[in-house]
Image (cartoon, grey):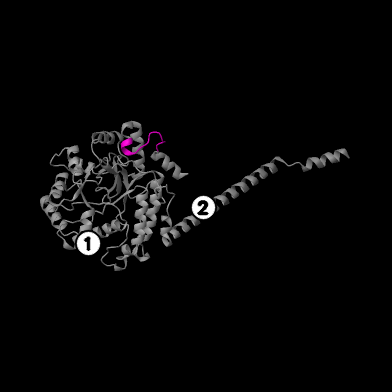
């Protein structure tokens, strides 16, 4: 009897193979549950993103509610009156879910109001990182001046109240806004139709700034245009068009030196004939300066073109130094190949070289100007520069509103946070 009992007990003990199969089954079950959980999370993420996008399209101004304010109605502490602003242009690199405007095709009826919702979301990002200057996209009002699409021409007037609200939000966080109309805006062309369409775009953007009730620091920056083989004639034609512009446009318009056609000397000569305000571009001056004008004294002349009581601004970027990878067809084999080419100095670097930048900033401590950074990494470049100022030139930190007592954000931290 005892032997039989022992045999029964022995037969109920799982074998090694059974144990192995059980472990494998549990592992497979656990993996399946994890896979199902990940799939459900992804589906929920897609559903949330779709719902968010639907809200952006159908109720865009719901993103433009008032954030918490202080007793003075401000959403951020006042920016130091004697500090210079650092800004960036259009695209937010630190948040890939933020759009600068409604990019839908005309068949889907894009609208300025949708763009304003996106803009308010960007305002939230700027508040989070205490950035006080931003260049809006020149495509904020899609197709608003397209000659063959009159159905879009009235959207700015339709959004007058919304523009006023967004302007108040910007002022409540001490935000300086501007436009930089595209390279297709040409005022010195011999083509009357092109000039007419360019003026229409400027009128539209000036009207938006007016409806936002922004002060004279909110500007539209353009270049002279095409040289057409004769720089002097190009300047003359620009002056002729200036005289025909409305008071609204002339109040907002600012002229910038460029890197290939019109130098700082050309822009200053146009100012002398028109009184137009001028924006100095640091990198462009290095690339296009046949007259050999000195850097800082020329910047001083540009700043003096601004009226008293209005803070001037300038553009700053460093030259891109990396090798360029380009695809081209081999003439002998007919096959496409990748070739390495030296950099073109008109190209903007992703981040500003800290030592070149700080050397320049130290050289203009006697001047008052906000600085629009045009590096390709956008807001990430601005955050890195603030970090570089705090680390390598702490004496400049108060000048740009950077507190040395608070932790300084770095671009790398923003990218890592966004990826988690």
**Residue 73: which disc?**
none
Between residue 23 and residue 90, name the one nearer to us: 90
Residue identified by numbered label 2:
42
Which mark is in front, 1 or 2?
A: 1
In the image, residue 401 lies in the stretch drawn in magenta: yes
Residue 30 in the image: x percent, y percent?
A: 61, 47
Callout 2: helix, strand or loop? helix
Left or right: 146, with 7 as reference point:
left
| Magenta span | 398-408
At horizontal 45% and vertical 60% (from top left) the residue drawn is: 54
Left or right: 31, with 19 as reference point:
left
At horizontal 23% and vertical 38% (from top left) the residue drawn is: 367
At horizontal 20% and vertical 62% (from top left) the residue drawn is: 196
N-term mark: 1 or 2: 2
Callout 1: helix, strand or loop? helix
Residue identified by numbered label 1:
197
């Amino acid at each position: 009897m005892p032997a039989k009992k022992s045999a029964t007990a022995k037969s109920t003990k799982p074998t090694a193979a059974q144990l192995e199969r059980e472990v494998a089954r549990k592992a497979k079950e656990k993996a399946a549950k994890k896979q199902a959980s990940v799939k459900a999370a992804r589906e929920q993420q897609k559903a949330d993103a779709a719902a968010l996008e639907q809200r952006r399209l159908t109720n865009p101004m719901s993103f433009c509610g008032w954030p918490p304010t202080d007793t003075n109605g401000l959403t951020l502490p006042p920016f130091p009156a004697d500090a210079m602003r650092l800004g960036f242009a259009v695209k937010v690199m630190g948040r890939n879910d933020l759009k600068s405007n409604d990019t839908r095709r005309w068949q889907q009826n894009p609208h300025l109001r949708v763009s304003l919702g996106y803009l308010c979301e960007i305002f939230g990002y700027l508040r989070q990182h205490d950035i006080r200057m931003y260049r809006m996209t020149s495509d904020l009002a899609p197709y608003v001046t397209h000659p063959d699409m009159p159905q879009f021409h009235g959207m700015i007037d339709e959004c007058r109240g919304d523009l006023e609200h967004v302007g108040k939000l910007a002022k409540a966080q001490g935000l300086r806004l501007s436009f930089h109309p595209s390279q297709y805006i040409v005022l010195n062309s011999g083509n009357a139709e092109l000039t007419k369409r360019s003026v229409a775009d400027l009128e539209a953007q000036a009207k938006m700034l007016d409806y936002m009730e922004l002060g004279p620091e909110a500007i539209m920056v353009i270049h002279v245009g095409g040289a057409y083989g004769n720089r002097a004639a190009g300047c003359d034609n620009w002056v002729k068009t200036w005289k025909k512009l409305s008071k609204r446009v002339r109040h907002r318009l600012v002229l910038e030196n460029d890197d290939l056609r019109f130098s700082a000397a050309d822009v200053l000569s146009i100012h002398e004939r028109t009184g137009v305000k001028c924006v100095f571009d640091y990198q462009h001056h290095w690339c296009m300066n046949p007259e050999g004008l000195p850097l800082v004294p020329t910047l001083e002349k540009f700043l003096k073109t601004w009226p008293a009581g209005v803070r001037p601004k300038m553009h700053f970027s460093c030259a891109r130094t990396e090798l360029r990878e380009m695809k081209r067809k081999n003439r002998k084999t007919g096959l496409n190949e990748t070739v390495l080419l030296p950099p073109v100095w008109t190209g903007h670097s992703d981040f500003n070289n800290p030592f070149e930048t700080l050397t320049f900033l130290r050289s203009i401590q006697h001047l008052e100007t906000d600085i629009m950074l045009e590096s390709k990494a956008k807001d990430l470049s601005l955050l890195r520069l603030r970090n570089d100022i705090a680390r390598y030139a702490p004496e400049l930190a108060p000048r740009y509103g950077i507190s040395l007592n608070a932790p300084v954000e770095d671009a790398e931290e923003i990218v890592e946070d966004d990826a988690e």
